[in-house]
Image: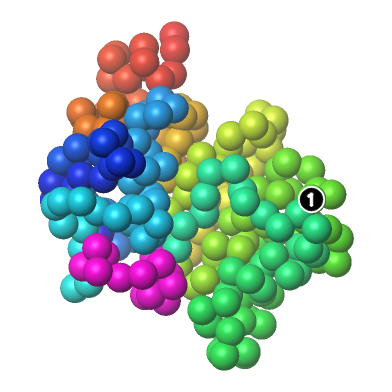
């Protein structure tokens, strides 16, 4: 479904990604592990059309992502839920969710159906649909961010650090939701620093350091890999 070969991405003279090879098959939940600044967000920005791919190839099915604009990428089912939520705090929860369906706005029945699905997944949001998104708790705001991404009808959902800054109980709930989204049929590529929680729900994982993939493998095997435990999990 998604295949990267030798992908290089940079900001002016700085190379954020150098020769990245990666693949994500339909139905998988794949985790991208790495410290701050390792290149996880840069990879997601490149895949979603926000950063230019300098060299290499990123294919989404038969499509070459390097030649598509961001709205076209969303329309083809690759949807990015960014780090830090990036909500419109003064707008209501409902308006934020509806903005996620912008490229599908003419499909009114489909948008209403998707909205019902998001409210079923996140009952708290149904109760607060008319509240400003900025007035919600951190966990509820992350629900809005994920819900907004789901309104884009993703076939592949890019989730960038969804557990960042959340309380442990909320983190547990968030990973349960991510697993449920995947089991319902959405392929997920998850960038996370919470390696233990992420690897427990994933099929496979990649480890990225200084813009390069340095390890890949089965999630369970990496969860018990001593070098991974020391670097990302602890004792």
Q: Is residue 131 left or right of residue 223?
A: right
Q: Secondary structure at mark 1?
A: helix
Quarter of the image for residue 24 reads bottom left
The structure residue drawn at horizontal position 49% and vertical position 72%, both measured from the top left corner, is 153
Where is residue 126 drawn, in percent x and y? 79, 65
Q: Is residue 230 left or right of residue 55?
A: right
Q: Which residue is mark 1?
A: 134
Residue closest to the far front: 12
The structure residue drawn at horizontal position 61% and vertical position 81%, both measured from the top left corner, is 111
The structure residue drawn at horizontal position 33% and vertical position 46%, both measured from the top left corner, is 43
Could you tell me which quadrant the C terminus lies in? top left
Where is residue 121 drawn, in percent x and y? 65, 61
Residue closest to the far top: 235
* Magenta-highlighted residues: 64-78
> With respect to residue 38, does 91 lie above or below?
below
Q: Magenta stretch mostly in which secondary structure? A: helix
The structure residue drawn at horizontal position 52% and vertical position 71%, both measured from the top left corner, is 152
Magenta stretch encompasses residue 77: yes
């Amino acid at each position: 479904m998604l295949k990267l070969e030798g992908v290089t991405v940079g900001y002016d003279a700085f190379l954020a990604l150098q020769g990245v090879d990666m693949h994500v098959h339909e139905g998988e939940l794949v985790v991208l592990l790495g410290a701050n600044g390792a290149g996880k967000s840069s990879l997601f920005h490149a895949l979603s059309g926000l950063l230019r791919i300098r060299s290499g190839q990123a294919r989404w099915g038969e499509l070459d992502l390097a030649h598509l604009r961001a709205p076209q990428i969303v329309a083809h089912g690759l949807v990015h839920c960014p780090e830090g939520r990036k909500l419109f705090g003064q707008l209501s929860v409902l308006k934020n969710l509806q903005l996620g369906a912008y490229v599908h706005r003419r499909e009114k029945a489909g948008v209403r159906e998707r909205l019902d699905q998001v409210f079923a997944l996140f009952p708290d949001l149904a109760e607060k649909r008319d509240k400003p998104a900025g007035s919600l708790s951190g966990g509820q705001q992350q629900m809005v961010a994920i819900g907004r991404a789901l309104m884009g009808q993703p076939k592949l959902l890019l989730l960038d650090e969804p557990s960042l800054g959340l309380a442990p109980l909320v983190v547990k709930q968030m990973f349960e939701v991510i697993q449920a989204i995947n089991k319902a049929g959405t392929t997920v590529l998850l960038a996370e620093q919470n390696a233990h929680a992420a690897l427990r729900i994933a099929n496979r994982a990649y480890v990225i350091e200084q813009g390069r993939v340095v390890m890949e493998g089965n999630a369970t095997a990496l969860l018990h890999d001593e070098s991974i435990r020391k670097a990302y999990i602890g004792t």
